[in-house]
Image: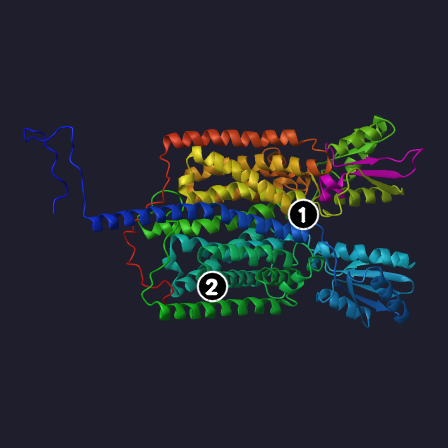
Amino acid sequence: MSNQTPPRTSGTGLPDPASPPVPTTDGAEGAAEAAAEAAALKRAKAETIGRYVAMFFMPLVMVSMMISGYLGTMHAPTPHDMPIAVTGTAPDARAFAEALEAADPDAVDVRIVGSDEEARERVLDREVSGAVHIVDGEATVYTAGSAGSSQSSTVTGMLAPQVLAQGLTLGTEDLAPLPAFDPAGLGAMFLATALVMAGYLPFSVTLSNSPELLRFRRAVPLLAGWSALVAALVWTVTGPMLGVVQGHTPEVLGIAWLGVFAVGAVQLLLTRFLGPMAVIAAMLLLTVLGMPASNMSMSVYTMPEFFTFLHAFLPMPAIGEALRSVLYFDGSGVGSHLMVLVVGAVVALVLTLAFDARKRRRNPDAGPPPVTVPSLHGGPRPATPRWRYTALLFFPLAMVTMMISVMLGAMSSPTPRDMPVAVVGSTVEQAQEAVDGLDQSMPGLFDLRAVGSVDDARTQVQDRTVSAAFVLPSAEHPSATLVTNQAAGASAKQVVTAVFGQVAAGQQTELTTEDVAPLSTTDTMGSVSMYLAMGWVMSGFMIIIVGANAAPRSRPLRRLVPIVAGWAVFMSAVLWLIAGPITGSISGHFWPLLGTGIVAIFCVAMFSAVLERLIGMLAVVPAVGILMLVGVPASGGGLSIYMEPEVFRVLHEILPMPAAVESIRSILYFGGDTVGSHLVTFGIWGVVSLALVMVIDRVKPLRTGSVPHEPDVAEPEPVKELALV
């Protein structure tokens, strides 16, 4: 059948030039082709919408989940049902126990025990958080610093006022002090954090890039080898290199191997059920819930009660407590925590096998999951599996190495180094004499500055020029005064209070304290600024990393800039809602926090875009390294920068994370006095990054579609079933 009708002719019989041929098709064929074209357009539109939804959904869920979990549990930790043993003369012990319970019934779980020896044993076995022994008008408070320094301070803070209120003489004894090479007890905590990351991260990336490796008979031996590699790595960094872990080599290696293997086995199971969404489930179970339940950074008895229940079976608490038992308590109690890991690994592997068998029965001809991230570096898929697998190994290995080396190296030995403190005398000369004497008695700890006016010193403390001011006694004021600024850094206040309390005692002078900016009751640890800043930074780099792979059409600057601008407004508002109405961590300050958050998120996103343009998904490594793993210690949000290696003081003035933390502190506690300078920092990062993106786009072709996926040269034919045993 002809595809054209004859052209209209003129009167001469020749074709009329004004009448072109009119194409026609068979009616049924035309309808079918039109329907197919419409269906294809509909599918393409649905795919585009789905990709953009994924671009926003994944970062929104991950950031909101992380920040809600941390702010909701750790902005104002409060003791609840904390087990306390009381022993001594029966009437005295019972009277003290009743008074302690009456003071705050929800805070403590008092247990009267028969002897001082039993009370000590319970503290060392971590059956109780602390104990009190009362005899002959004296009360000795027992704690175990190695079971958690925050728990010890919480116990002492609860028990000391009750001891003094009953007219007893107070004494304290740390039955298990932390070793000198790990004075903050951070070794076990950062080891556990790194091992959990090493367990869930590899399989999450492998599913998208090389799903053939997730076949059960491949995945299990690979996981065993990876666990051994990570165990050797973390032991080398924490032991021979940093000296935070000393001795117990076989035990640490064994716990590390088992911890990574158990978490990896659980993650393998999650990938079967949830596919790419398994990374969200892993973050929820292992980090968002696992960290507050771990009992490592803060006592689990100061978290919401639900976390005491989770402490019994989540991997993070099991790994952390097992390491703590070995490192600080000669292995006492380690068996139960190892059993949690063993049972978890076995159950996860058995369930994975059962899932695979069921899937084969239902669909024996099913193919493997699609490759959604063909290349980690953003270019064409490597020609051979060797290079692809090398990138797969590098990605989690680099993340774990940075976590354990940078974070632990920065914070493992929190000792003041040249911390600025003003010394105030009646005259500058008198203050200088005191400075000279103090410098000789504690060299290197403080940068002491002679000041002749209390008002000048108080102003310097208020504007954070110095960490504190020590006012010498005078005829008008016979006691010494320590002026502090808790909102500028709770850790700095603790240090100067302890040290200058000893100085005043040595001078046989009473010490009074004055805090120019105390923390609010909803931010008792001073951690709100750090967690909110983490939310800003995570929002910035995640929208770029996820968007480049989920919706590559968003990558051109003409689309990316408005998308990121809208995202910055949205996420800044979401994070304020989380910090304010949802968790109650802050009150008010909506507009300044919203505006600063918008700038921070946008500028971090532009910097992340530079890295993503250059190295694709591998940009996660330098982005997380610079913005988070280096940025958090440099921020002063958790630990004063004057208690870390000096390089972090330099980075404090440069990196986005410190700018974010200090901006939030300034808004919450100091009327926004320094926000302008920090906005300049963000602006420099944003403008320079935007210019670099423009340059990169001119010299490097910009990919706006999926990375081409050509089969590897040496790659075998795809197996029919990924889960084939």
How far apart in space, not on screen, are marks 1 and 2 (Cα)? 36 Å
Badge nearest the viewer, 1 or 2: 1
First to last magenta residue range: 464-493
Residue 380 counted in the magenta span: no
Q: How would you rate the neighbour count of disc 2 (Cα within 10 Å): few for under 14, some for 14-19, many for 20 or more?
A: many
From where the camera sits, is residue 709 visible? no
Residue 482 counted in the magenta span: yes
Where does residue 371 sit, x and y in percent of width and height? 37, 53
Instruction: Indicate left or right for 435 with 596 as reference.
Output: right
Q: How would you rate the neighbour count of disc 1 (Cα within 10 Å): few for under 14, some for 14-19, many for 20 or more?
A: few
Quadrant in the picture for residue 223: bottom left
Q: Nearer the viewer, residue 108 or 321?
A: 108
Report the residue marked by disc 2: 269
Say which mark, if any, is on residue 581: 1
Quadrant in the picture for residue 172: bottom right
Look at the image and tell me in which quarter the C terminus lies.
Answer: bottom left
Where does residue 337 sit, x and y in percent of width and height? 60, 66
Q: Amino acid at mark 2?
A: Leu
Secondary structure of residue under mark 1: helix
Secondary structure of residue under mark 2: helix
In the rendered image, the vertical position of residue 278 relative to residue 692, given as above or below: below
Q: How many marks?
A: 2
